[in-house]
Image (spheres, grey):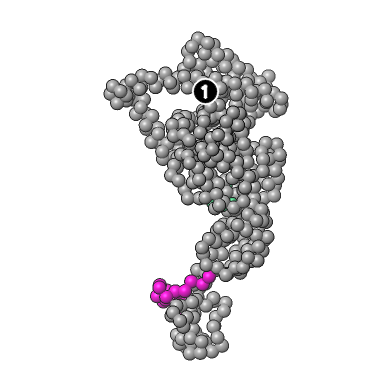
């Protein structure tokens, strides 16, 4: 018998015990057994090669998850009853204290304040924006659009190469949505809260449910729900199971709760997890028009002397760049005037306002009559053109004229930069999109 079939056999035996306990109304024990069985089934799923068997197994796992979720709700409700009574009597018990400790820990792992990124700050990605608006804006603003069988998306996965704006888009959702936003990095959850993580996950969902309408954003969702079970320890498996159970609840009847996930490696997601994200949107490298917009956004209000045509050429030259690559090239270009200031050995004085403008090193001297700055001759001013031979630190701070950034600064920065995403990586995303996703 292969290892996998023995794992399935064990899981089946454990689930049989869970069902028996369930029938005997021993719900807490039944829940624990279901969880254990689910952990084993998930490992088995990972190693199952036969697509048909995989599908059957996934359906079974989902069925058990539904039951585990129902039991959890019943157990929680039962547990809350005496707690509510105790709260009336003496202000809460040990369980409350533990819960608030966990929530305190969680508060440091989640970001709830609103960022300041609007839809317009995100270049391109129109279909992704439309899907997110459908999920988070329309249901609260126009609930009548979601009557009958038309239900908003409950789980959306943003996937794509690094630096394409997945987290940035999530920030736009947080800014624009009229909902409480909970943002967690799953690598943080896993690494910082080992042992506690599964309860933290449960509390995270509880807090979000209480705060509905709410959005839970999980960055690097693959590190929480990946299928790479090699080296995965018990605690990680339990987090994953808890997450799947919670997500199953979201898929069912959690009105007003959206789970937004982001990953650079969608293929490493557990199949069961992948199905929880019913909408999977590819956040691809930006097209030319989006790259042009990215240049504009990254330059913002900074003074420059570029024409529309220069911008067009830059957008053309940066094919294959991610949004993050473009923003790094722009930052590089924006720094070039600072370098001119720092390197300058000569400044021109503006006759109208007395401001000092640095002369780029390669353009010195300013005129043919400028005195040479040798060890013998140290004349500080040119009588002919008025250039002054000083360094940046000799200029009064309020007299410094900052040279605007020029097109050549951008061309230089782009020519000296690189794309961070390889063709082979892109191929992998295309394959995954064809099988499981859709273009953003
Ligand atoms: N479409 C875009 N519009 C505007 N800015 C973008 C866009 N894509 C990337 N950027 C810029 O690049 C930076 C990095 O993007 P972000 O962190 O959102 O990428 P990511 O896809 O989440 O990457 P990773 O997967 O590595 O976390 C952003 O802070 C933003 O400045």
- The residue depicted at 58 percent of the width and 39 percent of the height is 134
Residue lying farthest to the front in this orientation: 144
- The residue depicted at 52 percent of the width and 67 percent of the height is 303
Asked whether 321 or 257 is in front, the reply is 257
Residue lying farthest to the left in this orientation: 90
Residue 19 coordinates in the image, percent (x, y):
55, 13
Q: Is residue 262 above or below residue 340?
A: above
Residue 243 coordinates in the image, percent (x, y):
52, 30
Image quarter of residue 406: bottom right
Q: Is residue 94 above or below residue 263?
A: above
Q: Residues within 10 Å of mark 1 (few under 14, many from 20)?
A: many
Image quarter of residue 200: top left
Element type at marker 1?
A: helix
Residue 203 coordinates in the image, percent (x, y):
44, 31
Q: Is residue 286 above or below residue 35?
A: below
- Image quarter in which the N terminus is found: top right
- The residue depicted at 47 percent of the width and 50 percent of the height is 116
- The residue depicted at 57 percent of the width and 20 percent of the height is 64
Q: Identify the residue position indicated by label 1 in the image.
A: 69
Asked whether 354 or 98 is in front, the reply is 354
Residue 175 coordinates in the image, percent (x, y):
49, 46
Could one spot residue 32 in this view of the protein?
no
The span picked out in magenta is: 388-404
- Image quarter in which the C terminus is found: top right
Could one spot residue 396 in this view of the protein?
yes
Dominant SS of magenta comes to loop
Mark 1: is the Cβ under 8 angstroms from ligand 1?
no
């Amino acid at each position: 018998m292969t290892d996998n079939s023995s794992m399935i056999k064990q899981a089946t035996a454990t689930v049989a015990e869970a069902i028996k306990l369930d029938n005997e109304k021993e719900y807490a024990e039944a829940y624990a057994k279901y969880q254990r069985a689910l952990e084993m089934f998930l490992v088995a799923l990972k190693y199952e090669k036969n697509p048909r068997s995989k599908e059957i197994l996934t359906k079974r796992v989902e069925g058990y998850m539904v039951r585990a979720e129902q039991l959890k709700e019943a157990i929680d409700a039962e547990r809350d009853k005496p707690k509510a009574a105790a709260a009336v009597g003496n202000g809460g018990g040990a369980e409350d204290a533990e819960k608030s400790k966990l929530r305190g820990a969680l508060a440091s792992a989640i970001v709830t304040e609103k960022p300041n990124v609007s839809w317009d700050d995100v270049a391109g990605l129109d279909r992704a924006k439309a899907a997110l608006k459908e999920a988070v804006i329309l249901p609260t603003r126009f609930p009548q659009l979601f009557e009958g069988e038309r239900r908003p998306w409950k789980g959306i996965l943003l996937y794509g190469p690094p630096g394409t704006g997945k987290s940035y888009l999530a920030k736009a959702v947080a800014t624009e949505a009229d909902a409480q936003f909970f943002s967690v990095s799953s690598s943080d959850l896993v690494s910082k809260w080992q042992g506690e993580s599964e309860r933290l996950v449960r509390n995270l969902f509880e807090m979000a449910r209480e705060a509905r309408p709410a959005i839970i954003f999980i960055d690097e969702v693959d590190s929480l729900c990946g299928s790479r079970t090699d080296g995965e320890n018990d605690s990680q498996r339990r987090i994953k199971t808890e997450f799947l159970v919670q997500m199953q609840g979201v898929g069912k009847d959690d009105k007003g709760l959206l789970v937004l996930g982001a990953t650079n490696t969608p293929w490493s997601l557990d199949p069961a997890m992948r199905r929880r994200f019913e909408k999977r949107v590819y956040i691809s490298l930006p097209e030319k028009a989006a790259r042009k917009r990215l240049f504009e956004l990254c330059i913002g209000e900074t003074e420059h002397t570029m024409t529309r045509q220069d911008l067009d050429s830059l957008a053309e030259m940066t094919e294959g760049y991610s949004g993050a690559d473009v923003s790094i090239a722009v930052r590089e270009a924006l720094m070039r005037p600072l370098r001119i200031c720092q390197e300058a050995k000569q400044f021109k004085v503006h006759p109208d306002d007395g401001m000092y403008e640095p002369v780029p090193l390669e353009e010195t001297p300013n005129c043919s009559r400028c005195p040479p700055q040798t060890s013998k001759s140290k004349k500080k001013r040119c009588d002919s053109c008025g250039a002054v031979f000083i360094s940046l630190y000799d200029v009064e701070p309020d007299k410094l004229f900052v040279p605007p950034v020029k097109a050549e600064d951008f061309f230089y920065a782009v020519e000296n930069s690189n794309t961070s995403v390889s063709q082979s990586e892109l191929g992998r995303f295309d394959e995954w999109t064809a099988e499981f996703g859709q273009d953003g």
